[in-house]
Structures are given as structure tokens and as C-alpha cells.
Amino acid sequence: MIVKKKNQSQNQNINRDGKPYHGSKIIVFDLDDTLVITDAKIKVCDKKSGECFSLTPEEFNEYESNPNHELDFDDFKSLEIMKAGKLIEYYLKILKEAYRNKLAVGIVTARDDQNMVYRWLLEHVGFKIDKDLIFAVNDPNQGFNGTISDRKKEAFIRFMGLGYKDFQFYDDDTDNLRLVKSIESEYDGITISTIKAIKGFSV
Ligand SMILES: [Mg+2]
């Protein structure tokens, strides 16, 4: 549990034993439409009419939930679909620079498999991001509840539990950014810059 307290700059010097990165600053990225564009789609079927359609993650951000709809996220379980995705170089470059400068790098994604995200980053993108800095907020093993935005906010509170206080967060979804940003006014000594990722920066 984080206790509200005044900003204490000595926390900038947190030593993280055995890690290449230290300190209380972390750069955090969403995955879909922030670091990668894939062909993975959410399949939606209406139980009443039997009608089905697909949504891209971007469209899903705007999707209004409907109790008659059944959602299928199976495409997002496929490492192959993820590997076939197009990396968004602009944000990947920011990740690379943070990594090179020995800053902590974290991932907060709506995906449901922390291990797959870890493997994709390691084997396909070429970065070893510590598993304790990867939150796949729909992974049942990670124990999040609520809407995607609620879960993402909770992930940041968990980062705070690891001693992080200074955040840069890249996500293409405005609701996620807004909710995560709200932490700043709820806890003292926390700085969060939120940056809306633009898909078009993939070239
Ligand atoms: Mg996204």
C-alpha cells in the first residue's frame, strides 16, 4: 500500500540489485497500436441476432459494451500474429534509448498473457524486459479487475509499490492516459507524463 507523503528526492537513488537500471524513473509502453500494429482482431458476435463482426484494437477502444455481445480475443493469444505485426519505429526508438540509458522500461497492455509479451519482446523485438515490469492486465494470473483503464491504472499503482515515482506513459487510448494521469493528483510525489501514441508514426 502506498502512503501519501511529500516528494522525497532521495528516492531517485534507489539501487536495484542485479538490474541494469536503477532509480525511480520508468518509461512505460502500451503494446497494441503503440509499439506494434498487428492483424489481431476482436471478434464480436451478437447472441440474439447471431450477427458477427471484427474490431481492430483501435476500434475496440471506442466500442461500447453490450450485454448481448460475446467477445473473442483469440487472435491476441497468437504469438505468430504478434510476430507478423508491424513495429512502430518511432516509439520503439524511445524504448531503445531508455534501455540504452539504463532506465527501467515497463509494459502495460490489455493483452492476457504476460509470458507471451515477455517472449515477443525478447525473441522478436530483442529486448529483455523484466517480467515484473510487464503487466498484461487481462492475464488471469496477474489478478486485475475492472475496465481496461482501471486495470492499467492499477498496474501503475503496482509500479509505485516497486518504488517508481517518475513515469512516462505512451498509449494510443485517451481513456487509459486520462485515468493513469489521475494518479498524480491522488498521490504526492508522483509525476506522470502521458503521451498519446500516434499509429501513423510507424514509418
Ligand atoms: Mg493500444
Image (cartoon, rainbow, N blue to C red):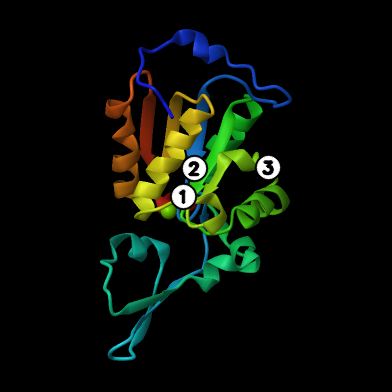
Q: Which residue is mark 2?
A: 29
Q: Residue at x 47, y 47 (%)?
A: 30
Can I make out residue 203 in this image?
no
From the viewer's perspective, tell me whether residue 154 is left or right of residue 127. Answer: left
Can I make out residue 129 in this image?
yes
**In this picture, is 148 found above or below 6?**
below
Local SS, label 2: strand
Q: Which residue is mark 3?
A: 127
From the viewer's perspective, tell me whether residue 137 is left or right of residue 80. Answer: left
Q: Residue at x 50, y 42 (%)?
A: 91
Structural distance between the alpha carbons of marks 1 and 2: 7 Å
| Relative depth, front residue between 128 and 155 | 155
Local SS, label 3: loop
Residue at disc 2, CB closer than 8 Å to ligand 1: no
Asked if the residues shown at circle 1 and circle 2 are in contact, with their CB atoms under 8 angstroms apart, the answer is: yes
Q: Residue at x 46, y 41 (%)?
A: 155
Q: Which residue is mark 1?
A: 34
Amino acid type, mark 3: Phe
Residue at disc 1, CB closer than 8 Å to ligand 1: yes
**In this picture, is 170 found above or below 187?**
below
